[in-house]
């Protein structure tokens, strides 16, 4: 998906899987079809856009920005409604997440706080500010059952906050084990597993009670983002080593998607689990079909990304040009 003018940081599928939202250093939020058609460009942030999220009903998008605000946009194309702007953070807002019922939005900031907002109507209200992290907060996620909020931080920890209606949120667990900042955090669809992505190059899988399940090792640089397939069986990780890796829940590396020029930032599974979208430093969002990439012979995969080189490089002899014959489907 091409159209952004700078690094793409955040990406998310809509709940029905028919749209993607992306946020970029070019200060814009873009809405796309998964096939690559640009639907809308949302402009209004005064600095880079980092995290993006769809509301559970698919009618709104939230964005987090270096301009210290979060914004909520209506995606109704017939509406000329201005975005709602949430102000109050003292520094960059890095992540946003809607609660499963769509009534609340969490914003995570470099100021070390998470703010919870009531966003049921057009005048959002700050409900509470969660403090406890010792450094910038880099990621935030609600559990699908609505009972917990997870935050990931540059203090090397993930914190799990208990949410009970009518009561203020309280800190339930601090997950320790990463050796440097934790960028991404997400829950499995059944809310029984938390995954975290860290600058220590690893992905960690945790029980919400704080127990470490396993550590996924294989990236050669920062693991920036992580997403769990809806059935809980596949974990996708995006890394600054310019690869996306797919892992089995038991820790087995299933495949590595490589051959790209830029570092990967955000990553998202589609709601049906069949597609994976990743945000790249090369100003694009890349969408793969999970079954296609998992069933590819490694040689077929390698041949796909040297295909143009074999055709266009004038230094190759005719035998070398045919090295991939039989490994590429003829279109």
Image: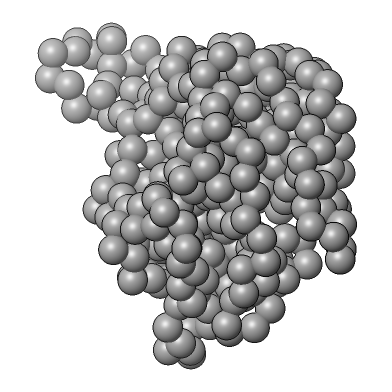
Visible residue check, residue 263: yes
- Image height check: is 165 above or below 311? below
Residue 212: quarter of image: top right
- Image height check: is 239 above or below 267? above
- Image height check: is 97 above or below 291? below
* Left or right of 94 on screen, residue 104: right
Task: Choose between 36 and 306: the one closer to the eye.
Answer: 36
Query: Which residue shows up at 73% across the image and 29% down it?
Result: 174
Query: Which quadrant does the C terminus fall into?
Result: top left
On the image, the x and y values in percent for residue 46 come to 28, 63
Residue 132: quarter of image: top right
Query: Which residue shows up at 59% across the image and 51% down it?
Result: 114
On the image, the x and y values in percent for residue 45 come to 34, 65
Query: Which residue shows up at 62% across the image and 55% down it?
Result: 129
Residue 27: quarter of image: bottom left
* Left or right of 225 on screen, residue 42: left
Task: Choose between 277 and 237: the one closer to the eye.
Answer: 237
Task: Choose between 226 and 212: the one closer to the eye.
Answer: 212
Visible residue check, residue 37: no
Query: Which residue shows up at 33% across the image and 71% down it?
Result: 44
On the image, the x and y values in percent for residue 288 come to 54, 41
On the image, the x and y values in percent for residue 83 come to 45, 77
* Left or right of 79 on screen, residue 175: right
Which residue is farthest left?
A: 314
């Amino acid at each position: 998906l091409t159209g952004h003018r700078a690094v793409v940081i955040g990406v998310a599928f809509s709940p029905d899987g028919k749209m993607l939202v992306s946020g970029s250093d070019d200060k814009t939020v873009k809405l796309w079809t998964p096939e690559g058609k640009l639907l809308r460009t949302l402009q209004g942030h005064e600095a880079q856009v980092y995290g993006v999220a769809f509301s559970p009903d698919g009618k709104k998008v939230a964005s987090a920005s270096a301009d210290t605000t979060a914004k909520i946009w209506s995606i109704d194309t017939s509406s000329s409604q201005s975005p709602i702007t949430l102000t109050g953070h003292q520094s960059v807002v890095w992540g946003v997440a809607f609660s499963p019922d769509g009534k609340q939005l969490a914003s995570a900031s470099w100021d070390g706080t998470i703010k919870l907002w009531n966003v049921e109507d057009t005048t959002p209200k700050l409900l509470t500010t969660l403090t406890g992290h010792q450094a910038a907060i880099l990621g935030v996620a609600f559990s699908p059952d609505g009972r917990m909020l997870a935050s990931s931080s540059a203090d090397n920890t993930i914190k799990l906050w208990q949410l009970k209606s009518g009561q203020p949120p309280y800190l339930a667990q601090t997950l320790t084990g990463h050796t440097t900042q934790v960028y991404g955090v997400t829950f499995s669809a059944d809310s029984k597993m938390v995954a975290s992505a860290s600058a220590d190059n690893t992905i960690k899988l945790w029980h919400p009670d704080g127990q470490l399940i396993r550590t996924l090792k294989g990236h050669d640089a920062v693991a920036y983002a992580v997403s769990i397939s809806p059935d809980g069986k596949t974990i996708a990780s995006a890394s600054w080593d310019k690869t996306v890796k797919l892992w089995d829940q038991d820790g087995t590396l299933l495949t590595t998607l490589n051959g790209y020029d830029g570092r990967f930032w955000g990553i998202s599974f589609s709601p049906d689990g069949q597609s994976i979208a990743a945000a790249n430093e090369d100003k694009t969002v890349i969408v793969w079909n999970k079954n296609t990439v998992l069933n590819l012979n490694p040689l077929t995969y390698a041949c796909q990304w040297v295909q143009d080189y074999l055709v266009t490089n004038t230094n190759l002899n005719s035998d070398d040009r045919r090295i991939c014959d039989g490994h590429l489907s003829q279109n």
